[in-house]
Image (cartoon, rainbow, N blue to C red):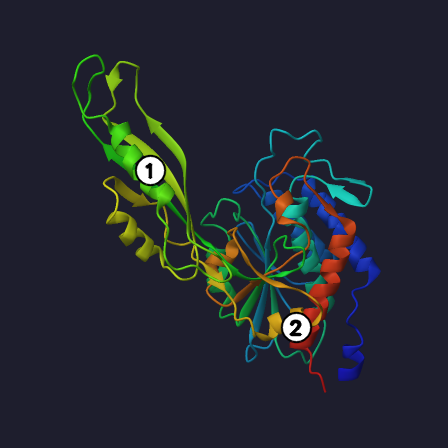
């Protein structure tokens, strides 16, 4: 049995073609964050067609391997089926899944449809196997793009303890072993209204400029080998009601990408001691995440030529409370771009590499 299973490390061409068809169906079905009912139905139908049991919680689809053993550790395979709204620069119909020159075009094809259907193929491949060292749980989740409360976070209790997770996002199938966290600050500088023609009032914009300059120029001393420095960017500003009134308040937003060397609380403390504006964090949920460079799944990736790096972008990895590896077919540079696409060959390679990595970890090698 073990030897026979060890030889089944190639996903069938039929399964690969079926998930490509699923990807095209997903593209053709609008699934903006919070409105993923249609794509959840498609994923459920795919599992039904293969007699695979699953559960649905909101717009999240969960499935376990056939011989799930509560005494064994769990590997979570996670990716999302929601999308952002299409970029205004699209020249194609974002919901028309066209295949040309080896590419599949359409909204969500690269982020993260390719990774999602690749993980689904791998899950289906391993689903009926016995005597694995781990259980597999597949989670096709909602609300990743807006970090909403009804996505992966809402089903972690149902999934239960997880030994480690593979998070499917476009990384060109290289190993993102660390990911920056996200901290968004809403800041308010307060002055005093007055007439612009007279020496009246305290201009809140001028007060805000001092704090904005601090956010622009301050350098956190601790830099990560994988993730580099903490990066702060002022991305939004609002002030004033009319041209002749000195504004009494100025509001601005700061996007902070946090490396693993600082907690969100430490960032807030440092900022609070250096600026005069009122600071309100939107959330403390999106933490930096990582997995040890010598973790078995990382070592498995290295053995088949994958490279390790730190990712500057944020994903559901930030909400999964266990070691996690971000890896998937596609290129992050294409995410959220106009005329988004993924190569068919990237999906095929992704399926094969996921399978080879999991084979090394889950299957007894004797």
SS type, badge 2 = helix
* Up-down relation of residue 362 to residue 206 (above or below): below
Residue 316 x %, y %: 51, 55
Q: Secondary structure beneath disc 1? A: helix
Residue 126 position (above or below residue 111): below
Instruction: Residue 256 in the image: state x and y as whole percent.
Output: 41, 47
Q: Residues within 10 Å of mark 1 (few under 14, many from 20)?
A: many
Q: Residues within 10 Å of mark 2 (few under 14, many from 20)?
A: many
In the rendered image, residue 47, in percent from the top left (x then y), is placed at 69, 57
Q: Tell me the quarter of the image containing the C terminus.
A: bottom right
Q: Nearer the viewer, residue 240 or 164?
A: 240
Q: Distance from label 2 to label 1 (Cα)?
A: 45 Å
Residue 64 occupies quadrant = bottom right
Badge 2 is on which residue? 300
Q: Is 290 rendered above or below residue 276?
A: below
Tell which tag, 2 or 1, sits nearer the viewer: 1
- Quadrant position of residue 338: top right
Q: Residue at x 43, y 59 (%)?
A: 223
The numbered disc on residue 212 is 1
Quick check: 58 left or right of 13?
left
Q: Is residue 50 visible?
A: no
Residue 85 placement (x, y as % from top left): 57, 36
Asked whether 51 or 158 is in front, the reply is 158
Tell which circle, 2 or 1, labels the residue nearer the N-terminal end. Answer: 1
Which label was assigned to residue 117?
none
């Amino acid at each position: 049995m073990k030897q026979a299973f060890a030889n089944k490390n190639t996903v069938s061409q039929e399964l690969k073609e079926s998930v490509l068809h699923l990807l095209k169906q997903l593209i053709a079905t609008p699934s903006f964050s919070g409105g993923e009912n249609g794509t959840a139905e498609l994923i459920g139908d795919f599992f039904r067609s293969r007699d695979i049991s699953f559960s649905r919680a909101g717009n999240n689809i969960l499935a376990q391997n056939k011989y799930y053993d509560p005494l064994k550790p769990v590997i979570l395979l996670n990716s999302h089926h929601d999308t952002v709204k299409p970029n205004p620069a699209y020249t194609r119909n974002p919901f028309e899944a066209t295949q040309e020159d080896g590419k599949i075009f359409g909204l969500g094809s690269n982020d993260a449809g390719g990774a999602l259907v690749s993980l689904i193929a791998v899950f289906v491949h391993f689903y009926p196997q016995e005597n694995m060292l781990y259980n597999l749980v597949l989670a096709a989740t909602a609300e990743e793009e807006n970090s909403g409360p009804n996505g992966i976070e809402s089903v972690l209790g149902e999934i239960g303890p997880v030994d480690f997770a593979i998070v499917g996002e476009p990384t060109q199938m290289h190993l993102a072993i660390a990911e920056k966290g996200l901290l968004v600050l809403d800041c308010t500088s307060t002055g005093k209204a007055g007439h612009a023609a007279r020496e009246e009032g305290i201009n809140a914009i001028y007060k805000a400029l001092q704090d904005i300059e601090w956010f622009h120029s301050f350098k956190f001393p601790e830099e990560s080998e994988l993730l580099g420095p903490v990066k702060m960017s002022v991305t939004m500003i609002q002030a004033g009601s009319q041209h002749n009134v000195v504004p009494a308040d100025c509001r601005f937003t700061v996007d902070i990408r946090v490396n693993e060397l600082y907690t969100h609380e430490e960032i807030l403390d440092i900022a609070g001691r250096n600026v005069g504006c009122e600071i309100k964090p939107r959330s403390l949920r999106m933490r930096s995440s990582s997995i040890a460079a010598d973790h078995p799944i990382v070592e498995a990736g290295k053995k088949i030529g994958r490279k390790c790096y730190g990712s500057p972008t944020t994903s559901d990895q930030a909400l999964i409370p266990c070691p996690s590896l971000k890896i998937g077919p596609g290129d992050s540079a294409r995410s959220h771009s106009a005329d988004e696409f993924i190569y068919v060959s990237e999906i095929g390679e992704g399926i094969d590499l996921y399978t080879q990595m999991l084979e090394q970890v889950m299957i007894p090698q004797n």
